[in-house]
Amino acid sequence: MTAITPLLTDLDEAQVRVDLAAAFRLAARFDLHESVANHFSAAVSSDGKQFLCNPKWRHFGLVRASELVLLDADDPSTMDRPDAPDPSAWCIHGAVHSRIPTARAVLHCHPPYASALIGLGDPTIPPLDQATARFWGRTVYDMEMAGPPDDPAEGIRVAEALSGYSVMMMGNHGVTVVGESVAHAFEELYYLERACRTTVLALSTGRRLRPMSDELANSVARMWERFTDQGVAHFNELKAVLDCEDPTYRD
Ligand SMILES: [Zn+2]
């Protein structure tokens, strides 16, 4: 279980657009995306029901701030709009934002190492190092996928299972992370894929794992809670890299 700091103010939409567009560009750079599917979203209203999402079938590496689609979870005509999102975006992200207003950013994707791990009989991330221990005791492993992600009932089920957590490993599907800001959620996703990579690489040696004791893993996981500012700093540095190399995400 994690404590997500409530931040129920109306956020500056322009800034949220820039940060979310940066998250898409960075996800493409880190190979966290898959095809033109997968979705990231960020709330712009205090109740979370108005949120930004990527345009349907836009490559993550090309997303611009101005083209993010503003959606309202309470608007049943959304899927009739000419700029209607992908149905799975509407079902999953609409359900999470409307049920968990503290989840200001919701990032869902199918990154390679996490996707490999969640297909195993035991998909848990063992506390092998500091990055893997970050997720010890604070990750929900949802192994009950009941239908395709464009089924509204699946969106509601996922939102309910995610409640109280910020990291979900979704069996036979992918990962979803939430955060109090785009920066916080992106840092979670960044470390989650690194932790899964370390786990898969360690397992691939065929040698016996040597995980931390539960007590040590717990203390390391708690340590990470004191490093939330580092996550914001990392995201700002990553945006600075984008600004040097291709600042068009801000457009
Ligand atoms: Zn998915």
Image (cartoon, grey):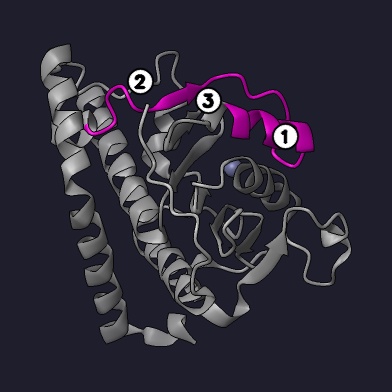
Amino acid carrying mark 1 in the image: Pro
Q: Is residue 15 left or right of residue 198?
A: right
Q: Quadrant of residue 217?
A: top left
Disc 1 packing (10 Å; few <14; some 14–19; many ≥20): few
**Compared to 208, does 157 lie above or below?**
below
**Compared to 1, does 184 lie above or below?**
below
Label 1 to label 2, Cα distance in Å? 23 Å
Amino acid carrying mark 3 in the image: Gly
Q: What residue would you read off at disc 1? A: 148
Q: What residue would you read off at disc 3? A: 171
- The residue shown at (70%, 47%) is 88
Mark yes or no: residue 18 visible.
yes
Q: Are marks 1 and 3 in contact (CB under 8 Å)?
A: no
- Which numbered marker is on residue 124? 2
Give coordinates of residue 84: x percent, y percent: 78, 64
* Labels 2 and 3: the sequence-earlier one: 2
Mark yes or no: residue 64 visible.
no
Element at label 3 = loop
Q: Quadrant of residue 22?
A: bottom left
Give coordinates of residue 136: x percent, y percent: 27, 24
Query: What stretch of residues is rendered in magenta?
Result: 134-160
